[in-house]
Amino acid sequence: MKLCRNLAAALWLLSLFGILCLPQVASAQGTLTVWPVKLEVTANTGEILEREINVQNEGDETIAVRVYTMDFSVDADGKYTFSEPGDESYSCARWITAGPADFELGASEDKKVLVSITVPATVEPGEHRAAILVEESTPADQPGVSVAVSGRIASLVYVAMPGTDGEAIVASAEIVSLMLPRWVEKGPAQVGVVIRNTGNVHLTVATEAHFHDYRGRRFGDMTLEQVVILPGQERTVRGTLERTPLLGKVQADFTIGYIDQHTQLVNKSGTGGFAVVPVRLILAFVVPLGCLLAYLLIRRYRSARKRRNPLGSSSQTGV
Amino acid sequence: MRPRIVLLATLFVLAALAVCCCYLAPLGGTAEAASPVSPSVTVGPGVTLALEDASNVQWVSGGAPGSSLNGTLQARVSSNVGWSLTVQATSGHTSTNELTDESHRIASACFTYTSTAGTPAPPTGDGVSNPKEFDGGNQTNVWTGGTATADCRVAVTYNLQIPKSQPPGTYTATHTYTVAPS
C-alpha cells in the first residue's frame, strides 16, 4: 500500500514536471512566404508579359489565400501607402491579372501564381508600378472585443517603358540637401541626407558618410539605410553619429551610389559641416577661471589704490 | 611434355600480364579538356510573414466600461532584402474601420499600439515607441528600416481604453499587417 502511494506520488510529480517543461507553442496563423517580392521588367506598348510569383504556407494548418493588385507609393520617410488600382499616377495595376486569385494552401504546400501584364497600346513613357498583395486572413469570431488580424506580403511590380519616340530610360539621383545640426555639445548627433530621384525609373540608392575633425583626421564612418526611391520623389536617409571630437569643426562627406541605365555604378557626393562646442565643459573651466581672474584683478586694483593714497588710508585710523 | 607445359605456362603469364597492363598502364594520348560546369542558381527576393499570438487581441470576456484592455501579438518576419512592416484597420465601422458592434463604435483615439523588437530582434530598424492610433484610411508604421534577416519578431502591444459610456456589445475590427520590400 505504501509502495503504491509512493509510486502514485512519483508519477504525479513526474507528470507535473513534464507539463511544466513542455515548450510554449505560440498560437499562430499560417506562415506565408512569397517570392520574388520584386518584379522588374521592361516592356513595349501592346506587349504581354508573364511572370510567376511563388506562394508557400510554411505553417502546419491549411490557410486561405487571396491575391489582388493595388497601387502603391512611398513617402519621403519610406512609409508605404497602398490604394485602389488607378489612384496613383504611373499605375500599372490595371494591366495586371494574377491567378488563381483565391485558393487554399495546405501545410508546407506551395503554389505558383501566374502574373500576366498586358501593356496598353498607348501609354506614357516612363516607369509604371503596382503591388501584388498576397494575403492570408483569419476571421475573428469571439464575443467581447475581438480584432481579426490578417497578414499580407507585397510583391512590387516595376514596368519600365521606353518612349515610343526613343526617349530613353534614365536612372539618376541627386543629393538635394544635407541634414546636419549647426552645432552640438557632444555626440550622438543626428545627421542625414535628402536624395531625389531625377530619373524616370525607381532607384535603389546606397549612402555612406565620412566625418573629419578640424585637423582633417577621419574619425567616423557610417553606412546608412539603403532605400528605394520612386521617380520624381525624394527620400530622407538618416543616421546617428555616436562619437564626435571634443571640440572644433566637423566636416561631413556624404556619398550616394546607384546603378544607372547603363548598369554602371554612379557615385555622387555632398559635403557639409557642423561645430562641436562642449558648453558645459567650457563653463566648468571658464567660470572658475573667470572668478579667479576677477578676484585677482580686484585685489590688484585695491593694492594699487592703497599705494597711490597711503594718507587716505591712515587718516581714517588717525586723530 | 615438359616443354609444352612450360610453353603454356609462359603464354598464360603473358596473357595475364597483358590484361593487367590494360588496367595499370597510364592512358596514352592527350585527355580532352573538361568543359567547365558552373552551377548557378538565381536567388530572388523573398519574404516570410507570420502573425503569432493573435488570440491575445481577442478579449473574449470584453472589458468593463472605463477599463483598459491590453494584448501583444508577434509579427514574425524573415527576408533576404530590406523590409518594412505597416498596419491598417481594414474593416470595422463604416468609413473609419474602428471597432464596431454594427450600431456603435469605439473611437480610434481609444485604440492604440506600440511596437518594439521581439525575440529574436530585427537586426536594424525602429518600432513605434509612442502610442499610435490605428488608422482606417492609411497604413501606419510598425517597423521601419528592417534589413535582411533569417528570423526576427516585432512585438505589437495593443491598448484599448473602453470609454465609461460605451454601450455594451460585441465589438470587432480587422487589422491588416503588410510587409513590403524596400
Image: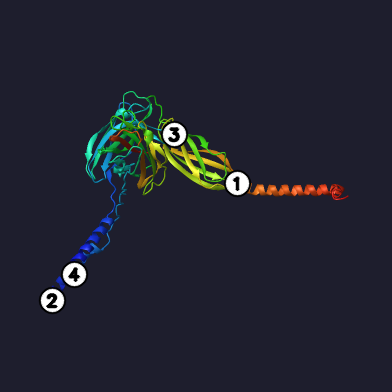
Q: Which mark is residue A280?
A: 1
> In this figure, which residue is indicated by the disc labeled 2?
B2
- Please state which amino acid type lies under the numbered disc 2: Arg
Mark 1 or mark 3: whose residue is earlier in sequence: 3
> Is residue A278 at all visible to an observer of this figure?
no
Dot 3 corresponds to which residue? A76
Q: Secondary structure at mark 1?
A: helix
Residue B15 rendering spot, x and y as whole percentages = 18, 66
Pick whichever, B52 or B43, lies toward us: B52
- Amino acid beneath label 3: Ala
The residue lying toward the viewer, choosing from B42 and A59, is: A59
Nearer to us: label 4 or label 2: 4
Q: Is there one chain holding both mark 4 and mark 2?
A: yes
Cα–Cα gap, marks 3 and 4: 89 Å
Residue type marked 1:
Arg
- Left or right side of B5 for A71: right
Nearer the observer: mark 1 or 3; the answer is: 1
Q: Chain of mark 2?
A: B
Residue A9 quadrant: bottom left
